[in-house]
Amino acid sequence: MQSLARKAPAGAIAILACSISAQSPPQAGLTVEVASARMSGPLPPNSPPIPAVGIMSGGPGTSDPRRITYTRVLMRRILVNAFGVRPDQIVGPSWVNDNDAATAPAYDIVANVPPNATKEQLNLMLQNLIKERFHMTLHREQKDFDAYTLVVAKGGPKLHEAAEPQASPLARQSGASAKSEFDQRGFPVIQVGTAAYVTNGHARATFRAVRVSQLLSVLSSQFLDSTHLEDKTGLTGTYDFNLDFSTAGLLGRLTIADTQRKARPPDIAADPAPDL
């Protein structure tokens, strides 16, 4: 098993501070061929619904690596992707700080990506695009955050290597809803991906063919937004495991919660759930 070791307080964590000023030249580096970069206008009549956070598609590692298309995406989300930071590490004017899709301005970007560009190179291109097209200047400051590190407990890891480590992305995406059964301990039964069920404040989550980074994402959803989690396990494989914990005092935003299941888990003895 892994354990969470607290660091209190974590220092020297960079936060990105943004301010609008006269246009300054972007730092030297790779650039994308921009076809369009503008504030989103009103949706045309009878348009299909768009998620509140917007749609980001294309780029390295996708089915369309030579082109990125951002539709009605908040600037805050663009900055998070381009600079590899958390939303709470960004400070700026109201049109950057506002994370409410109903009031914050959204942006449309269409750009061609050079052949064989990596995700890291695309991030640099986006940084240059932001500075050049949106006339934004940036500087870095330091701020203290509470932080936890995920480390391997004494005795080494006892995780099981995944039975299906090469599961396809489509299988992963549909894994949480592919089954509606539970095992005798009340954990959802799935082939790949993640699924969870919460009853009486006790969460039972199933992980199949997942990486530690995906576990960290689930844990992050249970803590305050200002709490940072870091993976220090050194584990790089994919694993099958279960996780159960008490939701008392947590945010309860279980992103893998499967609340639409028609089936219900068996009656389980009301043992106290572990404290996450």
Image (cartoon, grey):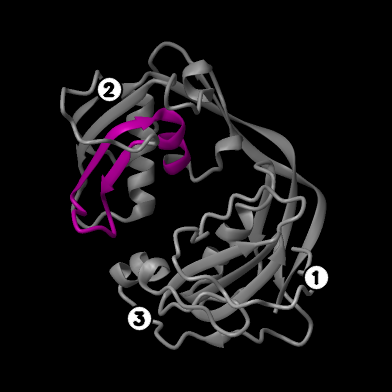
Q: Amino acid at mark 3?
A: Gln
Residue 261 in the image: above or below residue 251: below
In front of the other: 223 or 155: 223
SS for tag 3? Answer: loop
How far apart marks 3 and 1 lie (CA) works out to: 36 Å
Identify the magenta region.
Answer: 54-81
Name the residue rendered at 31%, 43% in the picture. Answer: 56
Q: Amino acid at mark 1?
A: Pro
Question: Around disc 2, counting alpha carbons within 10 Å, would you say few (fewer than 14), some (14 to 19), or many (20 or more)?
Answer: some
Residue 272 - label: 1
Left or right for 55, reference 161:
left
* 2 and 1 marks in contact (CB < 8 Å): no
Left or right for 168, reference 88:
left
Residue 62 sits inside the magenta stretch: yes
- Residue under numbered circle 3: 166
First-in-chain label (2 vs 3): 2
In front of the other: 196 or 262: 262
Residue 162 sits inside the magenta stretch: no
Name the residue rendered at 77%, 50% in the picture. Answer: 249
How far apart marks 2 and 3 lie (CA) works out to: 39 Å
Left or right for 79, reference 196:
left
